[in-house]
Image (cartoon, rainbow, N blue to C red):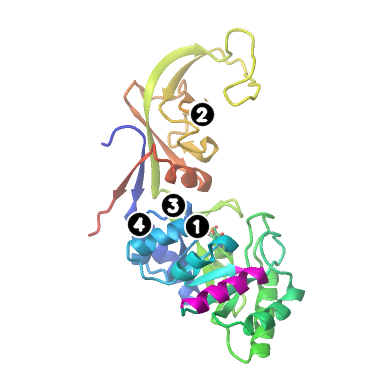
Amino acid sequence: MPEGTTLEVDLDKIIFNTSQVVEKCHRLGIAVLGVTKGFSAMHQIVSAMVEGGVDGLADARMENIIDLRKRNFDQEITLLRLPHLSNVENIVRYADTSINSEMMVIEALAETAKAINKIHKIILMVDVGDLREGLFAGNVLNAVKQISDLEGVSLSGLGTNMGCFGGILPSPENLGVLVGLANAVESKIGRRLEVVSGGGTSSLSLVEKNNVPVGINQLRIGEGILLGTDTTHNRRIPWLLQDAFLLRAEVIEVKRKPSVPIGDIGRDAFGNVPHFIDKGVRNRAILALGKQDVDVEGITPINEKIKIMGASSDHLILDITDCEQDIKVGDQIEFSLSYSGLLSVSDSSYVAKTFKRRSL
Ligand SMILES: *Cc1c(COP(=O)(O)O)cnc(C)c1O
């Protein structure tokens, strides 16, 4: 067993989840982009998504996309964050497609693409209510007209994003608005759009119920494939696995201590005034895991009897009083991860990563 703090990734489970999502979406004529930003695009996991059958890859970070290209991933890659005006050259070089909402940026992409003899594909983002990126419906046709006049870019399609800033749930109604707009755009430009992109994991509930409006032909899936959860709907997706990722950290102290600190209470290490409930003397363990390693709000002990009491930069304090097993210094405690937990731990250089693969 590896020492210290480790993120263990079960690649077979990633492949299983990917193939489940791909199969369900393909049945409805929907392509699946594997979204790689939730795990810093670690190439072993990206390969598992590819093996599971994704139709393309997508990430919000150019650093990740460039890294994937250096590792010879030759799939279609979509940049999932609005491009930086200051970085259009890399975007055109390394990503095939980007999501966009600003004409100034689209013009810069066009100019740069033309200069290096490329055609960069544009997904125009439409805001159907979540109030993150995108144009409101009334401005779409005008933007399409302007994009059509540019060389170096081609309008690949329309897309929308939900369940992010505003927590808006995808529905046949709001995705229907997107399809209606796509139809209007197609009449205006006299050709079919390649892509009508109807959101991420939160849209899978519509796939399950066969409620995706006809015309939506792409989803961009991260969380569902990785964690088998759908945070926007606050649910586990019953046909996916939830345990592809496991975080392990080592116990460095076990002692019985009172539940209320002794002395005058000032601020904790992060400037907050801590509050304590007196539960008497408790058995506690300290782990070598802290806020520098992981978003502590995003981890849950696998053993339900273990409770997280608090964390500082480098230490996690657990209440192990109700735990039947005897926990000793040197033991490893296991945690499952939420999306924010996964995001933070993937990016921490203090957490070792190991990959399991059985079915070779
Ligand atoms: C992150 C992201 C996704 C993927 O979302 P999941 O909920 O992880 O499936 C899709 N689209 C955009 C624009 C994103 O930023």
Mark number, residue 61: 1
Question: Does residue 60 appear in this view?
Answer: yes
Of tags 2 and 3, which is closer to the observer? Answer: 3
What's the CA distance linking mark 4 and mark 2? 32 Å
Whether ligand 1 has any atom under 8 Å from the Cβ at mark 1 is answered as: no
Dot 2: what SS? Answer: strand
Contact between marks 1 and 4 (CB within 8 A): the answer is: no
Between 71 and 1, the one nearer to me in the picture: 71
Q: Say which label, 1 or 4, has the lower sequence index.
A: 4
Looking at the rendered structure, the number of numbered marks drawn on it comes to 4
Between 202 and 340, the one nearer to me in the picture: 340
Dot 4: what SS? Answer: helix
Mark number, residue 308: 2
What's the CA distance linking mark 1 and mark 4? 14 Å
Q: Amino acid at mark 3?
A: Ser
Whether ligand 1 has any atom under 8 Å from the Cβ at mark 4 is answered as: no
Q: Residue at x 67, y 72 (%)?
A: 103
**Highlighted magenta segment, given as a residue range:** 100-116
Q: Is residue 188 above or below residue 143?
A: below
Contact between marks 4 and 2 (CB within 8 A): the answer is: no
Q: Give the residue furthest to the front.
A: 115
Contact between marks 3 and 1 (CB within 8 A): the answer is: no
Residue 310, position in %: x, y? 54, 26
